[in-house]
Amino acid sequence: MITGKGTKIVNGVAIGKIHIYKLPVYEINEGEASDPEAELERFESARLKVQAQQHALYEKALVEAGEESAGIFEAHELMLDDDDIIDACKEIMEDDQHTAEYAVREGFDSVAQMFREMDDPYFQARSADIIDLKNAMLDVLLGFDTDSLQGTEPSILIAEDLAPSETVRLDKSLILGIVTREGSSNSHTAILARSMNIPTVIQCKDISDDWDGKDAILDGYNGLIYINPTPERRAALTAVHEEDLRKEALLKEMKGLASETKDGRKVKLYANIGGPEDISAVKDNDAEGVGLFRSEFVYLNSAEDPSEEAQFEAYKKVLEALSPRLIIIRTCDIGADKTIDYMQLDKEENPALGYRAIRICLTRKDFFKRQLRALLRASAYGNLGVMFPMITSLSEVRNCKAIFEECKEELRIAGTKIGHVELGIMIETPAAALCADELAEEVDFFSIGTNDLTQYTCAIDRQNAKLEPFSDTHHPAVLKLIQMTIDAGHRHNVWVGICGELGADPTLTETFLRMGIDELSVNAKSILPLRKAIREMDLSK
Amino acid sequence: MKEFKYVITDEVGIHARPAGLLVKAVKATGSTVMICKGEKSAKATSLTKLMGLGVVKGDEVTVQVEGPDEEAAAATLEEFFKANF
């Protein structure tokens, strides 16, 4: 097995044979042309033909890659109308008596050179567009049929570099993946490969002509290509590939559809996330919002108490990227099984019932206010919900809200822009579930944390494997508390969701819908399978 | 001659596609139009020269319009800049 390494551009796995894609070597007559008039005519007819080709590519890219990517070819059409380029070529034919192909090579190369010498990377990358047009002109003038270069079987395409027009012109049904030696992540080729979702690796300096026709696997996730892969490698990547295909099929089927039963009962399917790195998972799995953003990551990933500014940036990033989805951020839930050095928390006999979450926040007010101020500032950049964990009493909720209001007032006086924020609490203690009617008066939503609710209701430590035989994740007492919480919420116009692991348990989805749950927040991977299950349900039966 | 200044707010500046549209818009006005950035200037009917200015976000350009109907042409172009750059 040989391994080649490059820069990953598009994720995914491609399995197949290698096909080396080589551009023709243009043989250009350097001498004088016998009939300059005829050369001018050849140039003009090639120019119009290439322009028509670019227009056809525009139409093709519009369908395959979307309007933004297709714009490249619209620009190409315009470049071919450019007087500077045309005049430069004409001059070479008229004054220097050269052939049309010679004029094209010289004229286009000098424009490409100008772009290459510019400072800005965007403009530098445009030289590739000019070279692309030059090659298209030469293909027409010299009668090359570039389509025949692609081979006839689906394969992993290997090339020195690919021009945008090649990337679009290539028959996608024959391309499993793309590896190039050159290219930049800024190039149109990279942009097109991304929008067409073909696994792609660029800047792979290891590629070699003798790979042609060999068995290979392209691992776009890691920017690697394996030639003659070992059986173990093959098995591992085949599994990844099959999972991708399954997901893709489901996505195609379920993306954009409502999470709604056959009899019209809608439920919101949100994602649980841990930080800004999960933004793409939310989008890829078509989550309708984020039901639980665990803010612990900003504390756990930091050597010291994170500043208001650092927190603000992290929250803002997620809110902006996922706007207009509702993003519910849970305030710091440190303690119990999640401890941090700089917090200097004492060791406890019984940490699950100890000094944790809101209990820390309400006694370390400055620490809490830093997070609330960061959240309020971020609220200007999207649709934010804030929820408080580990609530057991009405006074705790009122205290949290009082501090929240205090922060709001401070920011208002300072003239800081803030948006509307929905306020909610976690229902994860039996006390909160039993007092849900009173608590509902204070908030906009409830989110049921089934993991802790089960541990506290059944008095079973969820970290202790010995207790497995005694544990019942569907314990009727827990389900009763969930029903009480939903009913209490609805009596007070408060919507109710589940963000614990039970929310993703497909054997309970119908039960929860019948109970009246409004939202399920689950790991991103569970969203589309759940949506599919919900769409097949009929609660009227 | 009529002129106006404009600060580019578009992320990538005067890039290929809108530059092409600008050329079309300029030709439609029938005026002679120069785009200047610092010491450099380019005729706005040349796509490559325009892009050759390398105008990026934050740059200030001066647009000079000359022709029989330069008032109206300048107004049209100012709108165009606001909409595209």
Image: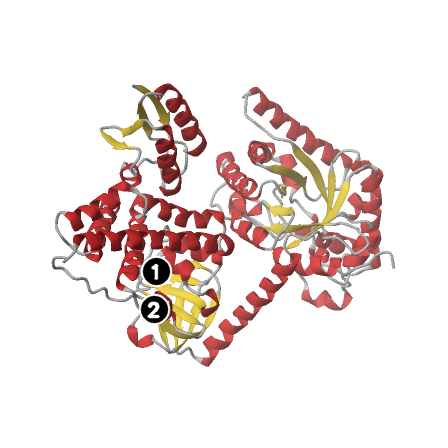
Say whether residue A487 is visible: yes
How far, Cα to Cα, is label 2 from label 1? 9 Å
**Which of these two is toward me, A537 or A79?**
A79
Q: Is residue A75 left or right of residue A505?
A: left
User: For numbered disc 2, what is the local secondary structure?
Assistant: loop
Q: Is residue A485 left or right of residue A233?
A: right
Residue A423's spot in the image, x, y percent? Answer: 69, 36
Q: Quickly name the residue at label 1.
A: A162
- Residue at image coords 40%, 21%: B72
**Which of these two is toward me, A254 or A428?**
A254
Q: Earlier in the sequence, mark 2 or mark 1?
A: 2
Marks 2/1 in contact by CB < 8 Å: the verdict is yes
User: For numbered disc 1, what is the local secondary structure?
Assistant: loop
Residue B58's spot in the image, x, y percent? Answer: 36, 31
- Residue at image coords 40%, 25%: B78
Say which quadrant the C terminus of chain A sits in. Answer: bottom right
In this rendering, is residue B76 above or below A438? above
Q: Is residue B33 left or right of residue A381?
A: left
- Residue at image coords 81%, 49%: A516
Which amino acid, mark 1?
A: Leu
Say whether residue A8 is visible: no
Using the rendered image, report if marks 2 and 1 lie on a common chain: yes
How crowded pointer 1 is (Cα within 10 Å; few <14, some 14-19, many 20+) is rated as: many
In this rendering, is residue A265 above or below A240? above
| Chain letter of disc 2 in the image | A
Q: Quadrant of residue A141?
A: bottom left
Q: Quickly name the residue at label 2.
A: A21
Residue A524's spot in the image, x, y percent? Answer: 62, 55
Q: Quadrant of residue A367?
A: top right
